[in-house]
Image (cartoon, coloured by chain):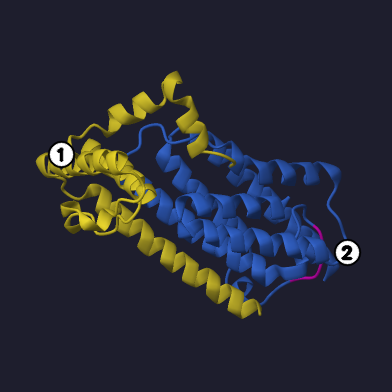
Amino acid sequence: MKKTLQAIALILAIGATVQTFKAYANETGFFSAEEEESKMSLLIELRKELSEKGETFFLRDTQVSAVFPQITNSEQLNEAVARQVLRYIQAIRAEDALIRVIKQPEFQSLRERAEPGI
Amino acid sequence: MMLGFGVLAFYRWQQTHLIFFLLLVLRDFAAGYFFLIRKPSTTKATIPVSIAAYVSAAIPLMYFQASEPIKSLMLASDLLAIFGFLLVAVATLELGESIGITPANRGLVRSGIYRRIKHPMYLGYVISEVGLVLLNPLNIALLAVSVSLYIFRAMSENKILKASI
């Protein structure tokens, strides 16, 4: 049992290391501002379409599906929008500004939800 | 308390999907379980030594957050945290029922990682805390206090265990 749990700990540590390197590679990779901007516009269009047609609208049936195949419902769309906004911020090298802004009192609720517990 | 930390680590994993938190879940629940079933100690540390041990255990929670996030330093810090807590987890599982915060004799463990490193758990903590110094230079003061206390705890444990051999 002890050896099994130690092996699990080792596997988790290896997994965490791989995940950390992947995240670093994604974050430091080159982002074209124009490319991220056009993806952003597509997502905004999709969002508009969704609010017009309601929840019965299938996201898979749109042109955007080729660019964002992972989006199949409104929750996934929200997540993609949030991710894309951050990618755009990275592309225009505005990460420091984002960190400064998010510390402002008007965004306190975002900070508290992002960092609960220890 | 360790079980509470385990629950928090699980919550953080659910939020972030960072595998590192699963390593913390494993370590914290294992430590919590061993604290519940651990052996009674035959020799205990004095009250000042016990206080020093509890202060030492609380210091990692006092470190300052990253001052200016530099990606390469954050990467190094994350890797140190992973490696440090791998050592801590492996040592916790090896110690089993002999676990404790204050120096005490609950049976000497000489198997597994303890065959090669005398105090792997403290070494693991120090490695992960060095990562926190990379994120914020102010943390160097806390690291100095922390390392001094780990050395003090290790020396107290050695003394108690030597006396009982």
At mark 1, the secondary structure is helix
Q: Tell me, what hue is chain B?
A: blue
| Quarter where residue B121 is shown | bottom right
Density class for disc 2 (Cα within 10 Å; few <14, some 14-19, many ≥20) is few
Q: Is residue A65 magenta?
A: no
Residue extending furthest toward the left: A34
Q: CA distance from mark 2 to mark 1?
A: 64 Å
At mark 2, the secondary structure is loop
Q: Which residues are magenta?
A: B104-108
Image-based side of A12 in relation to B95, left or right: left
Amino acid type at circle 1 is: Glu
The image shows residue B160 at horizontal and vertical percentages of: 80, 60
Density class for disc 1 (Cα within 10 Å; few <14, some 14-19, many ≥20) is some
Q: Chain of mark 2?
A: B
Q: Chain of mark 1?
A: A
Amino acid type at circle 2 is: Pro
Tell me if I can see residue B54 in this picture.
yes
Image-based side of A25 in relation to B10, left or right: left
Q: Tell me, what hue is chain A?
A: yellow
The residue lying at 54 percent from left, 37 percent from top is: B63
The residue lying at 48 percent from left, 38 percent from top is: A114
| Quarter where residue B157 is shown | bottom right
The residue lying at 31 percent from left, 59 percent from top is: A22
Label 1 sits on residue: A37
Number of callouts in the render?
2
- Seen in the picture, residue B86 relative to B151 is either above or below; the reply is below
Q: Are marks 2 and 1 in contact (CB under 8 Å)?
A: no
The image shows residue A72 at horizontal and vertical percentages of: 32, 56
> Same chain for the residues at labels 2 and 1, yes or no?
no
- Seen in the picture, residue A8 relative to B45 is either above or below; the reply is below
The image shows residue A2 at horizontal and vertical percentages of: 65, 77
User: Residue B40 has which mark?
Assistant: 2
